[in-house]
Image (cartoon, rainbow, N blue to C red):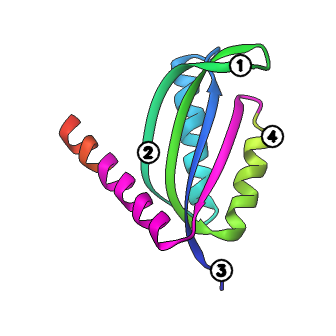
Amino acid sequence: MARIKHYETMFIVKTTLTEEEIKAQIKLVQETIEKNGGEVAGTNDMGSRKLAYEIKKNKRGYYTIYYFTAPTEAILEIERNYRINENILRFIFIKSETKKDIEHWTKQVESLQKNKKTAE
């Protein structure tokens, strides 16, 4: 039986896409997480920002962070999907292992959920 761990992933989508295409790419990542046994706990949509350096001739990128729990095997499949998606410029996974890391992860998710409720 696979252990469920806490993760966060940040990915950068090309800004040369239309707004609808960017939203579709973000939704595709969420669907990939859920399809592989993960559960999204929170999302931080950071929007379009200037990149620190040019990536594949792009100077700007659309940043999104997902906080989720998933079995360890799911990360390989999610990463594979990132790599074959030409619209994702960069990505990173952060695994929360220690008690302190998991507490920080939980506080981030709670903060995102509170901000979402006040925005509505």
Q: Position of residue 55 (x, y in %)?
A: 75, 21
Q: CA distance from mark 2 to mark 3?
A: 24 Å
The residue lying at 77 percent from left, 30 percent from top is 86
Q: Is residue 13 left or right of residue 46?
A: right
Q: Secondary structure at mark 4?
A: helix
Q: Is residue 120 in view?
A: no
Q: Which residue is mark 2?
A: 43
Residue that carries the numbered disc 3 in the rendered image: 2
Q: Quadrant of the N terminus?
A: bottom right
Image position of 60 (left or right of 112): right
Q: Label 1 near label 3: C-beta < 8 Å? A: no
Q: Earlier in the sequence, mark 1 or mark 2?
A: 2
Give amino acid for label 2. Answer: Thr
Looking at the rendered structure, the secondary structure element under dot 1 is strand
Number of the label disc, if any, that sits on residue 69: none
Whether 64 is drawn above or below 21: the answer is below
Type of amino acid under label 1 = Tyr
Residue 49 appears left or right of 89: left
Residue bearing mark 4: 84
| Secondary structure type for disc 2 | strand
Disc 1 to disc 2, C-alpha distance: 25 Å
Q: Earlier in the sequence, mark 3 or mark 4?
A: 3
Given contact means CB atoms under 8 Å apart, are the residues at marks 3 and 4 in contact?
no
The amino acid type, in three-letter code, at marker 3 is Ala
Q: CA distance from mark 4 to mark 2?
A: 22 Å
Q: Residues within 10 Å of mark 3 (few under 14, many from 20)?
A: few
